[in-house]
Image (spheres, coloured by chain):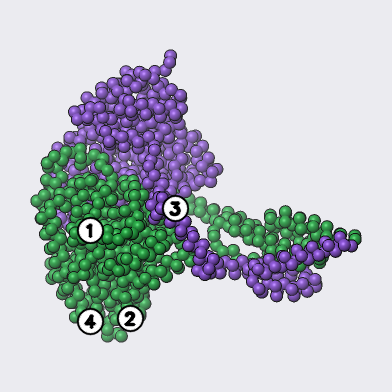
Chain colours: A purple, B green
Amino acid sequence: MTQSRFQLSRTTDADDEARNQVSTGGGGTAMRLIVPLQGVVQGRGGLILGSLIPCALFYFLQVYLKRHRSPPKSPSDIGELLRTASRSNLARSASVGRAHVSSRASSIAKSNDSPYYIGLDRVREDAYDELKNPNGIVQLGLAENRLSLDLIDHWLLQNLNVSMLGGGGDDLGISGIATYQPSDGLWELKVAMAGFMSQIMGGAVSFNPSQLVLTAGATPAIEILCFCLADQGNAFLVPAPYYPGFDRDIRWRTGVELIPVHCRSSDNFTLSITALDQAFNQARKRGQKVRGILISNPSNPVGSLLTRETLYNLLDFAREKNIHIISDEIFAGSTFGSVDFVSMAEILDSEDVDKNRVHIIYGLSKDLCLPGFRAGVIYSLNEHVLTASKRLTRFSSISAPTQRLLISMLSDLRFMKEFIETNRKRVQSTYNLFVAGLKKLGIECAKSSGGFCCWADMSGFVRPYNEKGELELWERLLNIAKINVTPGSACHCIEPGWFRCCFATLSEKDIPVVMERIRRVVDTCKPPT
Amino acid sequence: MTQARTPATQSDDDTNQPTTSGSGGVTTAMRVIVPLQGVVQGRGGLVLGSLIPCALFYFLQLYLKRHRPSSATPPPTPPTAVAAEVSSPSALHRVHSRSVISPRGAHVSSRGNSIARQSDGPVDIGLRKVSEDPYDSATNPDGVIQLGLAENRLSLDLVRDWLAENAMNSIVAGDLSIERIATYQPFHGLMELKVAVAGFMSQVMKRSVSFNPSQIILTAGATPALEMLAFCLADVGNAFLVPSPYYPDLDRDVKWRTGVEIIPIPCRSADGFSLNAIALDRAFTQAKKRGLKVRGIIISNPSNPVGNLFNREILYNLLDFATEKNIHIISNEILAGSTHGGEQFVSLAEITDSEDFDRNRLHIVYSLSKDLCLPGSGVGVIYSFNDNVLAAAKKMARFSSISVPTQHLLISMLSDTVFIEKFIQTTRERLGRMYAKFVAGLKQLGIECIKSSGGFYCWVDMSGFIRSYSEKGELELWDKLLNIAKINVTPGSSCHCIEPGWFRCCFTMLTEEDIPVVIERIRKVSETCKSHS
């Protein structure tokens, strides 16, 4: 009996405790409500009411708590919480710099340890110059064309004044330079640009100027397209190896992800639809929404061209998956060799396909040797994309004097024709010299038909055949041979031992110097055969 | 003994059961409730009978919250409707996703879509109207007169003369080789230009401050400068406080791509539209209540559209407020050189020079488009004391850099100190004269303006002429001014002004001869409005 009574009293204790808990949680009213409830529960409607009423009470308690959680912040204990929170903020910031920047900014501000940027920085500090700094670092890491700068220089000297002031500084000229203009580019420049693009692609395509949007370089052009096509957390498929700058151009501010689609040396790094499909499905499985494919044609870094067939397949794939295609054709005019360049725009012209999903990036930095002029192009057939990107050019427009200059330069058809021909020849001959030089050292390159880069296979000299070995070789090239190349890992290449060497910044007499420097390093790490 | 023991053990078993199986929620609920009867009618009845359903209900809510696609508040569902309720979220989900796929065609992103779809406000409509039919005293005397664009054409002749003489030399002549013009240069601006801009800024502010060129980032206009700062200081969903009325484009500049919100701090005509500390505090606490994280305050000084200046005291208060709340201040000072009248402009940089504040939270935006009459060349400046912001902005400058020929042009223009000195002086004089004439003209019509000390505008009170004292009445008057009087002004509602009836009139696009024409046109409309009332 005592035992049982003891149990009984224990349960009533528990009862009281529970009741106490309820009353403290819900305020004084709970007590008063629950006591009469006993009658209801033990009566007829017991089960339903006994569960309904507490539920309702509990629900109202939650509502009450939710409502009243923020206002009582100021009195007593919550106020204190706030203050301590802010104090801890202050304490933490004292080491960093007190006022916080956004998390996206702090991730951008952090120094970048990708070899691509380290190399570029090193060259900036100690650049090679035949006369003034013969022991400096030779730049092979920047896809810049200096081969035809003299032609531009010559033209500028003759035409600058007329072109910028519209023929003698009359009223129209000055308001053309100094007053507000449409931010997506002057109409005359769009017309001239469309003509130039079609000229450079061998007249195979014509571009409609009203579908062009001009931006301050191809970099913002790509970023604007990404803002228009993808939301935060969405992804683009990119055939890898790809241009190392894509990572920052696309991911930094848009919050869009890049998924590499790996291409292999056995296919000369051409894109296979199977690999594309695989990457797409994997991304899907991870819950990522793929919004498009980003290709560069001619490819940077490999230099290969996409064939007509591949382009058709890509279009089919994009239609099937209902995604976009961004085709970066910034090297379209810098092709050489026998393979014809085929623009995505040409495919669209010839076929009755869904044109809304194709967008082309172009710019004058590469083909016209004018990276300093910051002129980029978005060409799209999608009305929404055009409208949105026109509005977004307010953040990245080309300055009016430069636009005037470009209008008259691009409209000088005789000069442009001569320039394109000469420039092509020079790029090709430098390419041939460079590749021949590498061949003598036993280094092969992937077959290239365009662009300013050789994609060189140095896997024979990579000691452990992995990324670490590749980076060791890269470091030796940078510090001992004093040449800055871009390692394949920075381009997300899946096979170690490949390097991107940009040759268009070199003059012909620099090439033997570079080869000699490479030889020194290569000789020390010949495979132990 | 037995009697006593059985209920006790029974209740033990039962309590174990529901807690383990109850978490799932629904199909099990029935099975749980039946044995509950025993519990309820037993001794531990009251407590368990109320606790267990509560727990069940709680888990149901949790489950619903998890599985609902949107964050809409859960409707108060009675527990009897439980079974029906549970299957519905997944059904909802499927319908939702199907509707997204069904219009086969390439989709643009939702942010792209909202930018593309944004309909034109009065500002865009007005600008379009002017571009279709611009006034010209000789060739198109019935055209629309532009008073809606903040552009200074008063000193365009000076710039033109300088360019005619020097443009050629500044870009190609001398030791400037083509390598330095055409090739890749630092995206955040040439050091020579930064030095020149720092000097110009300090000259424009009457040498009251000096700026350190290494704290300057150059961008292609003030618009990207502001956006870049917003990217650097706030994450998606954070907010900035902005005293309203503010200039209409700020919404686009700050909100479009960054995903940052703007919370207006309403200023009133009773205070001369200057910032009120109480309103500031209230806006901050309200934002907090809404769960928004406020990362800073954006002010424009001289204010656009009102034209008043922030005095030293208000700036100190702002700094204190920012320090207390641990937030940033962005001061848009693009009109710093376009002041007139006796009042002295005080830059935020000057305040921090003299006092011991945490400078890491201060950022200044400047531009050459307003003070140097060069909107087409798009040169914007971020001046910041915060190393992290500078580092991030330097890297972001690749998305918005100034073309190198333009930079060289500006270097030589800004280095021509004789020209710059004369230019600043002349512009100030012309600005002051135009302002006085314009205000006097309005006064004749019985229209008052807020006293302005800078900028290209008058902030005009036409509340006496609007038929209904509301935004609708204001827009009706604006429409009449545009279509009958043929002048394009900016209505206060586009500037998020809380009081209806105010308009921004920009007078620097006019010549002196145009002023009587404008005043005459306003008179026509104002008289018809008066007669109605």
Kindly state the secondary structure of the residue where label 1 is placed.
loop
Q: Where is residue A123 in the image (x, y as percent from the top left)?
A: 29, 34
User: Which residue lies under the disc numbered 4?
Assistant: B446
Check disc 1: other Cα within 10 Å, few if <14, some if 14-19, many if 20+: many
Q: Are marks 4 and 2 in contact (CB under 8 Å)?
A: no
Residue drawn at (20%, 46%), measured in percent from left and top?
Answer: B192
Left or right? Give the position of B295 relative to B20: left
**Please, which chain is the residue tagged with disc 3 on?**
A
Q: How far apart are marks 1 and 4 (CA)?
A: 40 Å
Residue drawn at (21%, 60%), measured in percent from left and top?
Answer: B208
The quarter holding residue B320 reads bottom left
Q: Which mark is residue B467?
A: 2
Q: Which of marks 4 and 3 is in front?
A: 3
User: Which residue lies under the disc numbered 3?
Assistant: A92
Q: How far apart are marks 2 and 1 (CA)?
A: 48 Å
Residue drawn at (74%, 73%), measured in percent from left and top?
Answer: A35
